[in-house]
Image (cartoon, rainbow, N blue to C red):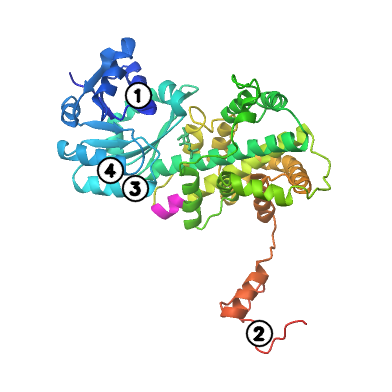
Amino acid sequence: SQARIGLVGLGVMGANLSLNIAENGFPVAVFNRTGSVTDAFVASAGDLAERLVPAKSYEALVASLSRPRAVIIMVKAGGPVDAVIDALVPLMAPGDMIIDAGNADFHDTRRREAALRDKGLSFIGMGVSGGEEGARQGPSIMVGGNPESYAVIRDIIEAIAAKHEGVPCAAYFGPDGAGHFVKTVHNGIEYADMQMIAEVYGILRDGAGRAPAEIGTLFAAWNEGPLNSYLVDISSRVLGTLDPKTGQPIVDVIVDKAGQKGTGRWTAIEALRLGQSPSAIEAAVAARSWSAEKATRQAGKALFGDLGSEALPIPSEADLERALLAAKIIAYDQGFKILAAASAEYDWALDLASAAEVWREGCIIRSALLDDMASAIREGLPQGQLIFAPRFAGLIRDGATALRRTVAYAASAGVPVPAFANALAYFDTMRQGRGTSDLIQAQRDFFGAHGFERTDGGEGQHGPWAGSVAHS
Ligand code: 6PG
């Protein structure tokens, strides 16, 4: 039988994506390196099995597809993706396409796209967000590659995607790595969102001595307001969950070392390459890395744990809520700036509003705010800054004092809040008409004759340093 699309890699994400495709009425050919996995998958698919075409070899997979052929790869990023591509390419014909649906480094996607294009094939880099449940019920999908190839599979992609008021949360963003880049920045923002929620948890747990369940109840209340989002919702559920083994709150039995597979770090690395510095996202990546240094932190506690502090009053719940909202908007501002910078660098003509739109449902960072963000971007961002947009400037103005109180409290009490503190530093910098880089420029000129611009526009781009005497 002929399938519209094929899928390689029947791990949880691949299996769920296949079921989602089948459920939407499209026959899908499925292949896994281990044949028994393919059999078990089809056997467990119930009624949907009739739309699954199990293949036991790459040849059989390709042979079962209608033309032009399209094969989704859902395997571990890196070498395994290249291995599958190498196996598929000799079996494909001009016009056929390979779609990488994993979390790829967009540089790899650019390289693979160029290599396949040379062979007359098409390579689509497709970011998919929403975890296991999203893959099955409707993820958010960010596509990059050849637009003619995307047009061939667009009906399938839009059918399987999450919907916001009926509109599919799937979009084409531009050539080669554009889709995977948008997904990478999504994950960078995801890191910042998660870290900021964890920082509030830290203030309430270590500063206010609140129990996890109480904090969970507060988050549940916030989830009914402007902070309404998937991550606040699941955080509230997590905090209310008990460990079946000990009966203690589950968070209390989880080791405080965060894992990371790289996408958050890639966001920071690519941003730095583009001359950006998304401080809240960088701080979230740093916080995960620092968290992994458990033994060091324990040694540090033995050495400095008794330092004590003169803590300022703890911020009110309302202040914490407003601080979290303001810091979150600042992190998104930084994320959208990275997208804009990459678009300019790689000539992608990225539609930033479209990114906000596909993130409204299905993905991990889905939240009530994203609809407003999309509108603000469509209306035009002053200076490219989300925080300057009329819709958000009011919230930021309103939340700035709360954010400042929160950071000041945390510093005074010795509770680390790297993402909040860095969001605030960025905000304060972006509202400082005259900063302190006059001195940096003078220092550079002093030791390296790097030159500077004068405020009066006048001539004389070097300082009169010769013979300058240091103050004693
Ligand atoms: C998503 C998630 C998903 C995955 C990441 C998390 O959008 O569905 O981002 O892609 O959970 O791999 O990355 P870390 O393992 O680095 O936290």
The kind of residue tagged 3 is Asp
Q: CA distance from mark 3 to mark 2?
A: 48 Å
Of the residues under marks 3 and 2, which one precedes in the sequence?
Answer: 3
Closer to the camera, 129 or 374? 129
Q: Could you tell me which quadrant the N terminus lies in?
A: top left
Q: CA distance from mark 2 to mark 1?
A: 68 Å
* Label ID, residue 15: 1
Q: Residue at x 44, y 39 (%)?
A: 183
**CB under 8 Å between discs 2 and 1:** no
Horizontal side of 35 relative to 294 (left or right) equals: left
Count residues near mark 3 (Cα–Cα under 10 Å), then give few for <14, some for 14-19, many for 20+: some
Q: Which residues are magenta?
A: 342-346
The kind of residue tagged 4 is Asp
Q: Label 1's element?
A: helix
The kind of residue tagged 2 is Trp
> Residue 236, percent across and down?
64, 25
The residue to which callout 3 is attached is: 108
Horizontal side of 122 relative to 179 (left or right) equals: left
Q: Is residue 162 visible to the viewer in this orientation of the structure?
A: no
The residue to which callout 4 is attached is: 82
Q: Label 4's element?
A: helix
Q: Residue at x 20, y 27 (%)?
A: 61
Q: CA distance from mark 2 to mark 4?
A: 57 Å
**CB under 8 Å between discs 1 and 4:** no
Q: CA distance from mark 4 to mark 3?
A: 9 Å
Discs 3/1, front = 1
Dominant secondary structure, magenta: helix
> Residue 302, percent across and down?
71, 48
The residue to which callout 2 is attached is: 465
Q: Label 2's element?
A: loop
